Image (cartoon, rainbow, N blue to C red):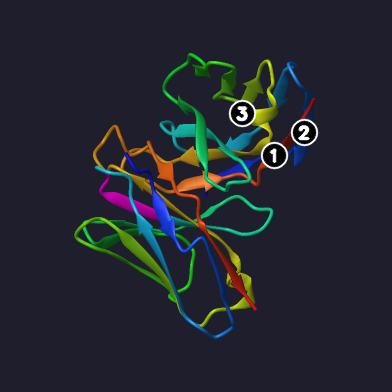
Amino acid sequence: DAGVTQSPTHLIKTRGQQVTLRCSPKSGHDTVSWYQQALGQGPQFIFQYYEEEERQRGNFPDRFSGHQFPNYSSELNVNALLLGDSALYLCASSLLQPGTNEKLFFGSGTQLSVL
Amino acid sequence: AQTVTQSQPEMSVQEAETVTLSCTYDTSESDYYLFWYKQPPSRQMILVIRQEAYKQQNATENRFSVNFQKAAKSFSLKISDSQLGDAAMYFCAYLRPAGANNLFFGTGTRLTVIP
C-alpha cells in the first residue's frame, strides 16, 4: 500500500515565478492538508481540501492556492514567489470521518528553493 | 490561539539510556489530541505516539511513553533504551477537536544518540 507521495522532491525557482507541487494521498484517504516547514521550524498549516473544496485555511496569503481532484490527489500552487517561500512543503492525508481525522500520514515533502 | 512550545532545541542521550523531551501547550479547549512526531533526515513526519486529552492514562508505544499533565498543559516524551535510529528531530503537535485537521507544531527538539 503506497503511502503519501509528493512530487517533485526538490525544486529551484526564481523570485516572481509560479510553482505547482503535487500530492497523492494514502490509498483510501479523502482529505489532503498542506504544511510549510521553514528551516529550523515546525510545520505550519496552509490549507486542507476535502471533496475538491478548500475546507480550512491557515494564515497564508492568497498567493497560495490549491486544488483537489476527483481521485483525491491535490496540488499546491504558489504565485509570485518570494525568497521567504523557500521551505519544505509537506502533504498529509487522512479520512474526514469522525474518529479518524486525527490519523494523519505525511509524505516526504518537496524542498522548494527560491533564488 | 493554540501554541506549542518545545524549550529544548537540542538533546543528547547515550545509547541504551533514557531521555525525556519536553513540550507545553496552550489551549482553551477541553477535548483535543496531542502527538509526538519524529522527522529523520528523510524529512517524512513519522507518528511516534498519540494521546487523547480525555484519557487520563498515559499513552505507551513500546520504548516510547508520555507524561501527560492536562492541568499543567504539559506533554513530555520519554524514550527508553535509546537506539541509534532514534536520532532525529522530534516535534510535539496539538490537534483541535474532531472536524479540524490542522496540527499546531512546536519548533522541534533535535535528538542525538551517542554510541
Q: Which residue in the structure is indicated by mark 1? A: B109
Q: Say what amino acid the circle numbered 1 marks.
A: Thr
Residue A32 among those drawn in magenta = yes
Q: Note whether A114 is above or below B53 in the view shown.
A: below
Give the spatial CA distance, label 2 vs label 1: 7 Å
Which stretch is magenta? A29-33
Q: Which residue is mark 2?
A: B11
Q: Chain of mark 1?
A: B
> What's under tag 2, amino acid-wise?
Met
Q: Residue B110 in the image: x percent, y percent? A: 72, 40
Residue A80 location (% of width, % of height):
51, 83
Residue type at numbered disc 3: Ser
- Residue A86: image quadrant is bottom right
What residue is shown at x 39% (from left), y 54% (from top)?
Answer: A33
The mark nearer the N terminus, 1 or 3, is 3
Q: Is residue A75 left or right of residue A61?
A: left
Asked whether disc 2 touches disc 1, contact meaning CB atoms under 8 Å apart, the reply is: yes
Going by the image, does B86 lie left or right of B112?
Answer: left
Residue topped by disc 3: B74
Around disc 3, counting alpha carbons within 10 Å, would you say few (fewer than 14), some (14 to 19), or many (20 or more)? some
Which of the two residues, B30 or B112, is positioned nearer the viewer here?
B112
Q: Secondary structure at mark 2?
A: strand
